[in-house]
Amino acid sequence: MFTEAPLLDVLNYLPDGIIIVDERGVILFANESFSDMLGYENSMLTGLNILTVLADIDIFQKCIATVMKEGKSLDAQTDFLHHNGHIVQTTKSVRMIRLDGNVRFFVNIRNLTELNQLNRELLRSKELVELQAHELSKLLNRKNQELEEILGSIDEVIWYIHSQNLTLSYVNDAINDIFGIPKEDFLTDPTLWQQHIHPQDRDLVEIFFKTLPQGHSQTIRFRIIRQNGETRWLDSRIHHHPKLNIFIGITSDITAPKTQSEEIAFLAHHDPLTLLPNRTKLKYQLNSRLEHSEDSPFALMLLDLDNFKNINDTMGHKVGDDILIEVSRRLQNTIDTYDFCARFGGDEFIIILHNADSTRIDTVAKQIVQIFKEPFAINGADFFLSSSIGITLYPQDASNEEDLIKHADTAMYNAKHKGKNRFVYYHTSMQEALYDVLHIESLIRDGLKQNLFELYFQPLINSKTLRIEGYEALLRFPHPTEGFISPEVFIPIAENTGDIHLISHEVLSQACDFIETLRMQWDDPFFVAINVSAKQFHREAFARELLEYLAQRSIPTSFLKIEVTESTLMENISTITHQLHELKGGGIRISLDDFGTGYSSFSYLAQLPIDTLKIDKSFILPLFNGDSNRHIVTMIANLAHVLGMSVTAEGVEESRHYDFLIENKIDTLQGYYLCRPLTKEQILAKLQEEAPYFEPKSTVGYSI
Ligand code: C2E
Ligand code: CA
Ligand code: CA
């Protein structure tokens, strides 16, 4: 048909349908795409009039006419009929061409059906996508809200910041509470959070972010300053995200737990009763002082309350506790802020005085002794206390913590030994071993085996006759190598080991020896007062055995008196009362020793078979320090007399003590001013003298 057929063959490769028709509409050529479009065999179309495959004939004819008339191409939409009857929408462009001198029409047909289909599908899928996108974003939004709600409701701050400039990109509501600033402010000013970091922690935070490697997580603790100026401690777990270039963190406010842990730390280092630093803190303090200020001298004072056990035993722990609190308050008021005061144990305190010269140490020590002069008013009652203080100096006395305390302890015992209520500086001549319990236990055993214990006798002077009415038996332990060991040291130890029973037997036997000897030389009645400790009363048979022993040695019971301390009595009143009655019934007189320190109830006193109240020397020695001691002494004397008891004062050291006591009707006097404790031989020798009665002006005595 066409000579140019090979050329036209190229048209077969075009995706659009191409036909060439003559002016009548006969199809001269149709390419493959066109035949495919209409579902015809390609060969079937050639020679066919286009009108047979057109759905709208008019359009085509109009179109041909226009093209012929205007001589140019024309684009129009045309519907074709598919071979199977359905319409194929197309756009076509018709162009008039000349082929072999004839007018021909070149029609380019593009299938719109497919395109439309595609478009529709595209549209549909677009709609679908939009719908899905909408749904998805709705879902995302919902999820976001949920997430936001979840994140908002937790107390931890969840956030992320840009890893380069540390600007905040996201944070949940919790930041509001922690910083006291609305979350929105942090988002509008993404560096605001940095401005609230505690100045002292800024470097720490900066370095943290600089050094946290990508992909790693680490925790950091730092402080922030809240809007109201308050400091908060934060703990942050932070992850350096490797892909997103952010630090993502979860931060919690640990201020409360930290305060709690501070509290725990405080309690670990402080005594819960007095709130003073405790032993642990003291040791820490001492060691760090020794490490860091090797050259600066200091003094360590170990203070032990005198007779505190009595208060605890007789008045109960609540009163004891209140007194300890008051003591710690007074101590703290005495020292400077840069000094240090700790509760070392039960009734022991340690004070460290910094850079103190000897004058200041002396002054403070005196002040401490002085603060006990004021009575301790607890629950409306006045309690009188004193303290014994041992002082060690750094670096003279010791260079380590252990020795400093040990030496102070030695000096403190020395102060007790010297009569309590005083301070004593440590000196190398003090035998530390003496205060080592195990050592003393073994010394006591040796002493008992080798009969080293010796009873001394201190005259008790009748204040009316000025004659000796009796003697207090006071045990001495002169050790060949250790020197004199105080009964105040060995008696409590012997009480613990049970050796007190052997010791007291020794006392009783020597007291009876003394009575026997004295009776032969001395016509006047007299008595020997022996001290009986609480432990002895624990033996039920104590009173009976004592009476039996005297009977066995044919000594009338009137020659013996026993001294029981007020605290011993109050400790176990029911069993002791029973034995006291037995002793009293047997004719032995009873003296209530150390009276005034044990706080016995007066109602008990009236019921007990007590002959004598013996006022403790802690009231007599400081008789002229203030008025209160003199009031107490006269009050006790009145009380004793009302109850039908006699009253004895011990610790009469000065003539003014003596004068006052005589004037105030104290029946019996005992003290260094009158006579020191003497050996049996010394007493016998004294009785040989022309005036064997006591003469106060010339203090006789054997000093130990
Ligand atoms: P205590 O029963 O209160 O004895 C009185 C203490 O005061 C004695 O101390 C005595 O030497 C001392 N003293 C006497 N006059 C004065 C004075 O004017 N000024 C001063 N500052 N002190 C004076 P000592 O002999 O050291 O006895 C201490 C404590 O040991 C006694 O206190 C007593 O509780 C206990 N003790 C002594 N001997 C025995 C004993 O044989 N058996 C028992 N269980 N305890 C004893
Ligand atoms: Ca006594
Ligand atoms: Ca006494």
Image (cartoon, rainbow, N blue to C red):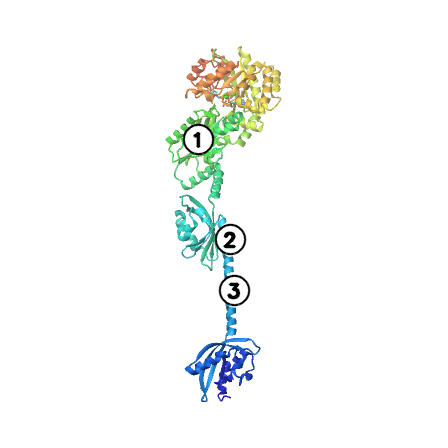
Q: How many marks?
A: 3
Query: Residue 329 bears which disc, if any?
Result: 1
Foreground: disc 3 or disc 1: 3
Query: Residue 570 bears which disc, if any?
Result: none
Towards the viewer: 108 or 328: 108
Which secondary structure lies at badge 2? helix
Tell me, yes or no, whether the two marked residues, 2 and 1, touch with CB atoms within 8 Å: no
Towards the viewer: 242 or 405: 242
Q: Amino acid at mark 1?
A: Arg
Which secondary structure lies at badge 3? helix
Coordinates of residue 296 in the picture (x, y in percent): 39, 38
Foreground: disc 2 or disc 3: 3
Of the image marks 2 and 3, the number of the one nearer the N terminus: 3
Query: Residue 146 bears which disc, if any?
Result: 2
Q: CA distance from mark 2 to mark 3?
A: 26 Å
Q: Amino acid at mark 3?
A: Leu
Coordinates of residue 108 in the picture (x, y in percent): 48, 80
Of the image marks 2 and 1, the number of the one nearer the N terminus: 2
Coordinates of residue 324 in the picture (x, y in percent): 48, 30
Residue topped by disc 3: 128
Other residues around mark 1 within 10 Å, as few (<14) / some (14–19) / many (≥20): some
Which secondary structure lies at badge 1? helix
Coordinates of residue 265 in the picture (x, y in percent): 48, 40
